[in-house]
Amino acid sequence: MTEAWRPDDEDGSRRGSSGPVRVRVPAKINLHLGVGPLRPDGYHELNTVYHAISIHDELTARRGDTLTLTMEGEGTGELALDESNLVIRAARALAAYTGLPAHARLHLRKQIPLAGGLAGGSADAAATLVACDTLWGTGLSRDELAAIAAGLGSDVPFLIHGGTALGTSRGEAVSPVLARPVSWHWVVAVADGGISTPAAYAELDRLRDTGAAPEPLGSTDELLAALRQHDPGVLAGALGNDLEAAALSIRPSLAATLSAGTQAGALAGIVSGSGPTCVFLATDARHAERVAAGLTAAGVCRAVRTAHGPVPGARVG
Ligand code: C5P
């Protein structure tokens, strides 16, 4: 049992922050997304390498008498701001864990596209946990926040930690990949509209049942060895995503996006997560700008961004 926190200290002063708490949280890509069999609980066993990149959402939490959410940026007008929103669910999960009332005024500034395969919703949930933890003065450890995060979604714990990390089980079991600090440079092709994650997994199951899916990627060993070599050319050869076949089956036009990126000079391109965002590896920041210009000129996607990784997970400031 968790002992309930009291909203006021012994001397009557309020715990936590009286001013606004601003948290930045990154998008994630999967350098390797190995999808195993469907489990009885409806999830697939994963072997994945998560990587946090420098496209950020920002969540600001202020004191309030109820729980409210407003937003601006990507997806405004499309994303429901009610109890179904992962931000609201995250605030309520932290409140339930700590025994505090879920009182906060939350504002989200979104740059990560909705249903894009970049874990934008999961990122916002992670940001909410970190922001409300500071606002309410509950002072949980990152591991405690990650445990609450696991109940909100498979990749929410990774967005608490950030960096580059191995994900196993349904993706919620995260351990950092220790490597010498090196930045990788990416070009991100944002598509029109999204792909639902359950739909992508279901399509992969269907392709596998009919023998139409490529061989499963399996272990992350090759990718982890490639990361240690610090050579973008080697990393390019090790990138892989079992969900790519499903995303291409749902959205065949992504094949043109992938080939436009390699024609623009990228070392490699993959669908990110369940798609439809595609990410391309470049040798350095200037190369990434050239690839981005080529992709923009090809007119195969809604927006093109450059990014680097790894970056930290959800952080105040
Ligand atoms: O955990 P999360 O809520 O993000 O998962 C969304 C959906 O994606 C799940 O309901 C499931 O259909 C699919 N999924 C899966 N296997 C995983 C993670 C997600 O099948 N390891």
Image (tube, helix red, strand yellow):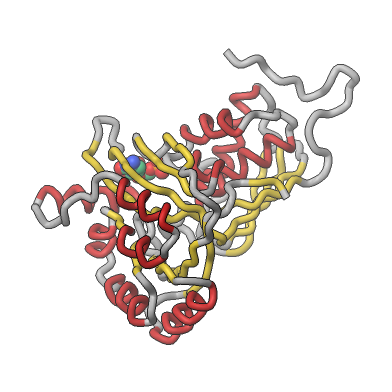
Q: Which residue is outermost to the front?
A: 229
Q: Which residue is outermost to the left?
A: 211
Tell me where residue 306 appears, x and y as whole percent.
52, 70
Tell me where residue 268 appears, x and y as whole percent.
34, 69
Q: Which image quadrant is residue 196 in?
A: bottom left
Residue at x-position 30% and y-position 57%: 240
Any part of residue 118 in sight: yes
Q: How many marks?
A: 0
Any part of residue 93 in sight: no
Seen from the viewer's position, the closer of residues 121 and 277 is 277
Asked if residue 282 lies left or right of residue 98, the reply is left
Q: Vertically, is 129 above or below 4?
A: below
Tell me where residue 145 appears, x and y as whole percent.
58, 33
Residue at x-position 60% and y-position 56%: 57
Q: In which quarter of the image is the N terminus?
A: top right
Q: Quadrant of ligand 1?
A: top left
